[in-house]
């Protein structure tokens, strides 16, 4: 039986020392698939200057015996501790070859944001758009499973990684580089750098729309994406109950503060539909997101029911939107996609004003 050589942290560090100063080498992670993920700590004001060095380091790690794939990430963790918070005037990152970028976000986890993002991307593609889907949820990447490409591995092109083709979409996720059972024990600056590289170092050319499945919540990683990426707009996903809507409001406030237009709110798990008899039950309440949208003055994009077939198709890697707009379970996603396209045409309008009633 042939055993593959497994690289060690020390063998990776030794290779790096031939290219970069030892003081720059941060965390080194070896995944179960023998992928090596490395961080290099740099001055945040000189990121572009260090890009050639990052590429040399990545090539050096890739040559280490036993390494399947190498990923080297620039991080400014040390310097950022004393750096002032970025302002709204921070230059935003454009992604070459992409006409518009939209973020699908939620104020908290567990509201089905990734399912909405995947089906929205598929629906937009079926409606004639050239679409990419970036899974930016570093801690819990679920897009590989939702799109049925769990075992896929991106190939390194001449200059950039080639995204995975899934159901006619260009797809990229940290889940392709790290086993889904491997915990990502990363600090904020490492995540920020990884996300920027997933945008900058992947060949997204030729896209009309890039859909970003944002990390849940409103922390540093989410703010960085909203602040540094040239977003055409954001879709906020919530469930109907009050506790979820409170968090959704926070997500709206985050986008407002960084001048990103909110394309609208989606109410996921809006109601439960029995697959046997068709009986409808408002398990989490109903209509809360619509009322919240009216209160905040932003569009309401639609309701998605809690239906067993949507969950089963998602688990099987076949987003329900693949069935087309005439399918009963897929239709809500096509309605949402149509409203998103309509909103993108007027995305230059001011973000909604947040009103807090005492």
Image (tube, grey):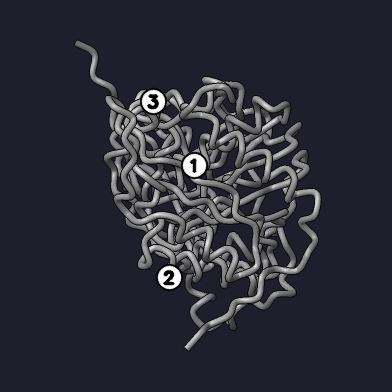
Mark 3 / mark 2, whichever is N-terminal: 2
- Establish if 250 lies above or below 313: below
* Residue drawn at point x = 41 percent, y = 43 percent: 141
Residue 91 located left or right of residue 358: right
Residue 149, position as x, y percentages in the image: 44, 25
User: Which one is nearer the viewer's eye here, 67 or 273?
Assistant: 273
Disc 1 designates what residue? 116
Q: Quadrant of residue 242?
A: bottom left
Q: Which residue is mark 3?
A: 313
Q: Earlier in the sequence, mark 1 or mark 2?
A: 1
Closer to the chain start, of discs 1 and 3, is 1
Q: Residues within 10 Å of mark 1 (few under 14, many from 20)?
A: many
Task: Sort mark 3 into few (<14), some (14-19) or many (20+) by Cα contacts within 10 Å.
Answer: some
Which residue occupies 32% across, 39% down? 31
Q: Compared to 197, does 294 lie above or below?
A: below
Element marked by disc 1:
helix
The CA distance from mark 3 to mark 2 is: 30 Å
Residue 349, x across and y down, in percent:
78, 64
Identify the disc placed on residue 246.
2
Q: Tell whether label 3 touches label 1 (CB within 8 Å).
A: no
Task: Give the quadrant of residue 342.
Answer: top right
Secondary structure beneath label 2:
helix
Q: How many residues crowd mark 2 within 10 Å: few (<14), some (14–19), many (20+)?
A: some
Give the left or right position of residue 234, taking residue 100 as reference: left
Q: Is residue 88 above or below residue 329?
A: below
**Residue at the (58%, 30%) spot, across then down:** 122
Q: Which mark is residue 220?
A: none
């Amino acid at each position: 039986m042939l055993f593959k050589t497994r690289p060690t942290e020390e063998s990776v560090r030794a290779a790096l020392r031939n290219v970069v100063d030892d003081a720059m080498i941060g965390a080194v992670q070896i995944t179960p698939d023998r992928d090596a993920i490395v961080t290099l700590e740099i001055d945040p004001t000189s990121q572009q200057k260090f890009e050639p060095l990052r590429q040399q380091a990545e090539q050096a790690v890739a040559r280490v015996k036993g390494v399947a794939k190498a990923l080297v990430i620039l991080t400014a963790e040390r310097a950022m501790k004393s750096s002032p918070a970025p302002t709204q005037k921070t230059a935003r990152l454009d992604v070459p070859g992409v006409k518009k970028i939209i973020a699908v976000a939620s104020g908290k986890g567990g509201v089905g944001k990734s399912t909405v993002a995947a089906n929205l991307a598929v629906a937009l593609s079926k409606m004639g758009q050239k679409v990419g889907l970036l899974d930016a949820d570093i801690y819990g990447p679920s897009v590989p499973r939702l799109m049925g490409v769990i075992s896929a591995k991106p190939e390194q092109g001449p200059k950039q990684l080639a995204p995975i083709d899934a159901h006619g979409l260009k797809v990229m996720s940290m889940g392709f580089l790290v086993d889904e059972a491997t915990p990502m024990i990363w600090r904020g600056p490492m995540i920020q750098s990884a996300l920027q590289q997933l945008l900058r170092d992947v060949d997204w050319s030729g896209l009309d729309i890039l859909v970003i499945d944002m990390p849940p919540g409103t922390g540093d990683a989410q703010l960085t994406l909203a602040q540094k990426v040239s977003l055409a707009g954001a879709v906020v996903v919530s469930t109907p109950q009050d506790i979820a809507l409170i968090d959704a409001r926070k997500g709206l406030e985050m986008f407002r503060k960084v001048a990103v237009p909110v394309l609208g709110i989606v109410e996921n798990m809006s109601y439960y539909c029995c697959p046997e008899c068709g009986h409808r039950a408002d398990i989490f309440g109903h209509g809360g997101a619509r009322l919240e949208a009216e209160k905040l003055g932003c569009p309401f994009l639609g309701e998605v029911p809690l239906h067993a077939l949507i969950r089963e198709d998602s688990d099987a890697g076949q987003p329900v939107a693949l069935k087309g707009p005439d399918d009963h379970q897929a239709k809500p996603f096509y309605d949402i996609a149509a409203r998103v396209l309509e909103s993108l045409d007027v995305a230059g309008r001011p973000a909604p004003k947040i009103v807090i009633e005492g």
